[in-house]
Amino acid sequence: MSLAKGPSGTSPVVTEDDGYVPSARRLARERYRRTRARRATTVATVSTLVTGAVLYVVITGSPGWQRTRETFFSAAYARMALPKVLEGLLLNLELLVVCGAAVLVCGMALAVARTLRGPVFFPLRALATAYTDFFRGLPLIICLLMVVFGVPALRLQGVTTDPVLLGGTALVLTYSAYVAEVFRAGIESVHPSQRAAARSLGLSSGQALRFVVLPQAVRRVVPPLLNDLVSLQKDTGLVSIAGAVDAVYAAQIVAGKDFNYTPYVVAGLVFVALTIPMTRLTDWVTARMDRRRAQGGIV
């Protein structure tokens, strides 16, 4: 603390020094926290190394490890399969982008249809509910088989028989039902007072839904939407059952030549490499929204 000269005729002004000296208790608390953090890091590292060593000994010491390594972890087959798998992966990425956009649009439309009020919208609500219940209960693999092999069997004029388009349609049909429920949960989580306040300002029901309810609902369901996107990325590999040459089918072609299954491992690792960044992004977005919600930054 120091004294500064005030204006003429006034008393001196008391000012605070910029330097801050933490108390001994605070310094001790910080040292204790650093010690605990170092101890936790050391324990985690040691336990991880021990677990890895045990798994390595158990796996490599098994009677069939030599044959398994040659069949599933051959470096030569991995180098041969990687270019083909990456070439097929482009199809998976295209399906992810196109089907992901279609799923978001269809899911939002279904969610809005299920939340419409009034008896006049009952048929629309019933159809949206039936669609959601049916495709959420139908396994994706069965939906793919029905669409990919059932639609061409109808021999309809002007209907495509392209396995990529049919497989993508099956993905959209199934994932739209899941995403619709995510959007509906977000819409119903918005407090009714928000809609009432919007109506009191002169907005119609549609305007209140569009400008007040939906923006809040979408922000709240971003993490589960990203999780569904991660699942969709993995399930694009199922279009290979229709004959589309994606990463999985490319691996199957290479593996079928010599009955070595290393290409499947390569394809799996490629999908894992794509999924992990999206998973970490989901975790980051979730943590960020939780912090903002705790601070009152999200309505």
Image (tube, rainbow, N blue to C red):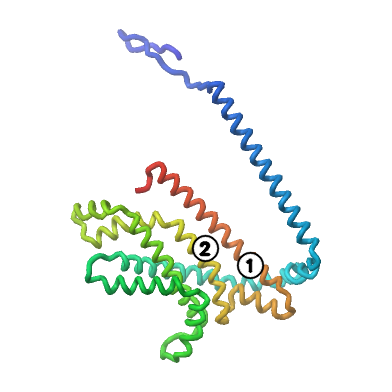
Vertical arrangement, residue 266 with respect to residue 276, above or below:
below
Write down the residue under mark 2: 230
Give neighbour class at mark 2: few <14, some 14-19, many 20+ (Cα, 10 Å).
some
Label 1 – label 2 distance at C-alpha: 14 Å
Residue 6 in the image, given as x and y percentages of width and height: 35, 12
Residue drawn at 29 percent across, 73 percent down = 124
Quick check: 205 left or right of 249?
Answer: left
Label disc, if present, on residue 29 of the rendered structure: none
Give neighbour class at mark 1: few <14, some 14-19, many 20+ (Cα, 10 Å).
some
Q: Secondary structure under badge 2?
A: helix
Vertical arrangement, residue 60 with respect to residue 150, above or below:
above
Residue drawn at 34 percent across, 9 percent down = 11
Label disc, if present, on residue 268 of the rendered structure: 1
Quick check: 113 left or right of 15?
Answer: left
Q: Secondary structure under badge 1?
A: helix
The quadrant where residue 206 appears: bottom left
Residue drawn at 51 percent across, 22 percent down = 20
The quadrant where residue 257 appears: bottom right
Residue closest to the eye, 23 or 254: 23
Residue closest to the eye, 257 or 28: 28
Q: Quadrant of the N terminus?
A: top left
Vertical arrangement, residue 1 with respect to residue 90, above or below:
above
Q: Are marks 1 and 2 in contact (CB under 8 Å)?
A: no
Q: Earlier in the sequence, mark 1 or mark 2?
A: 2
Residue 9 in the image, given as x and y percentages of width and height: 30, 8
Question: Of the residues shown, which amino acid type is indicated by label 2?
Answer: Val
Q: Please count the marks in the image.
A: 2
Vertical arrangement, residue 297 with respect to residue 238, above or below:
above
Residue 117 in the image, given as x and y percentages of width and height: 25, 65
Question: Of the residues shown, which amino acid type is indicated by label 1?
Answer: Gly
Quick check: 212 left or right of 79?
Answer: left
The quadrant where residue 256 appears: bottom right
